[in-house]
Image: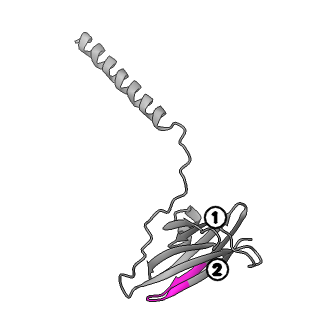
């Protein structure tokens, strides 16, 4: 009986060691993920409940467009605080445009950031309309 208990105890120690090893390996340094869009942009209107959202990012004076800015789309202000975007895009070269394509009707929060400069705004998407919103990095 004592021999069975010692074997059982040894196998438990081995399982415990393996579990600890797996946790250590899983918590290793992770590489930074490149900024990609989260969801696919819908380029074709699929219903009367969808509107198109196009965002242009400018400098603080509104005189020049800002390419390479990260523009994030949020469903609620809580999502903004938690940094949980519905989608994010990088504004295009030479135009400063981030085209989110067709979205369901509703209110959305937008955040643009480039370096130390940022802007946050709210936008209402309406069905069968193209909504153009400007963000100004301050």
Q: Residues within 10 Å of mark 1 (few under 14, many from 20)?
A: many
Instruction: Give the total of numbered labels.
Output: 2
In this picture, is 62 found above or below 37? below
Picture quadrant where residue 81 is located: bottom right
What residue sits 44% from the left and 28% below the top?
Answer: 21
In this picture, is 54 found above or below 24? below
What residue sits 62% from the left and 68% below the top?
Answer: 93
What residue sits 61% from the left and 70% below the top?
Answer: 111
Residue at the spot of label 2: 134
Q: Position of residue 58 (x, y in %)?
A: 69, 75
Q: Quadrant of the N terminus?
A: top left
Residue most extreme to the front: 94
Residue at the spot of label 1: 68
Please state if 72 lies on the left or on the right of 42 as rendered. Answer: right
Q: Secondary structure at mark 2?
A: strand
Q: Position of residue 29 (x, y in %)?
A: 55, 38
Please state if 46 lies on the left or on the right of 108 as rendered. Answer: left
The earlier-in-sequence mark between 2 and 1 is: 1
Q: Position of residue 82 (x, y in %)?
A: 55, 62
Q: Which is more toward the observer, 43 or 110?
A: 43
Q: Quadrant of the C terminus?
A: bottom right
Q: Position of residue 22 (x, y in %)?
A: 42, 32
Please state if 66 lies on the left or on the right of 47 as rendered. Answer: right
Picture quadrant where residue 98 is located: bottom right
Q: Residues in magenta?
A: 122-131
Q: Secondary structure at mark 1?
A: loop
- On residue 35, the disc is none
- Tell me how far mark 2 sits from mark 1, CA to CA: 15 Å
Q: Please tell me whether residue 126 belongs to the stretch shown in magenta.
A: yes
Q: Please tell me whether residue 49 belongs to the stretch shown in magenta.
A: no
């Amino acid at each position: 009986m004592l021999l069975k208990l010692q074997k059982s105890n040894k196998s438990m120690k081995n399982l415990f060691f393996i579990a600890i090893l797996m946790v250590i390996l899983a918590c290793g340094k992770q590489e930074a993920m490149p900024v990609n869009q989260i969801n696919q942009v819908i380029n074709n209107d699929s219903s009367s409940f969808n509107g198109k959202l196009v965002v242009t990012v400018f400098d603080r004076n509104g005189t020049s467009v800002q390419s390479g800015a990260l523009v994030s789309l949020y469903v609620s202000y809580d999502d903004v605080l938690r940094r949980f975007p519905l989608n994010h895009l990088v504004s295009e070269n030479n135009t400063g445009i981030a085209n989110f394509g067709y979205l369901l009707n509703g209110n959305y929060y937008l955040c643009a950031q480039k370096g130390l400069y940022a802007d946050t705004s709210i936008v209402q998407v309406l069905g069968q309309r193209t909504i153009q919103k400007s963000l100004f990095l301050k």
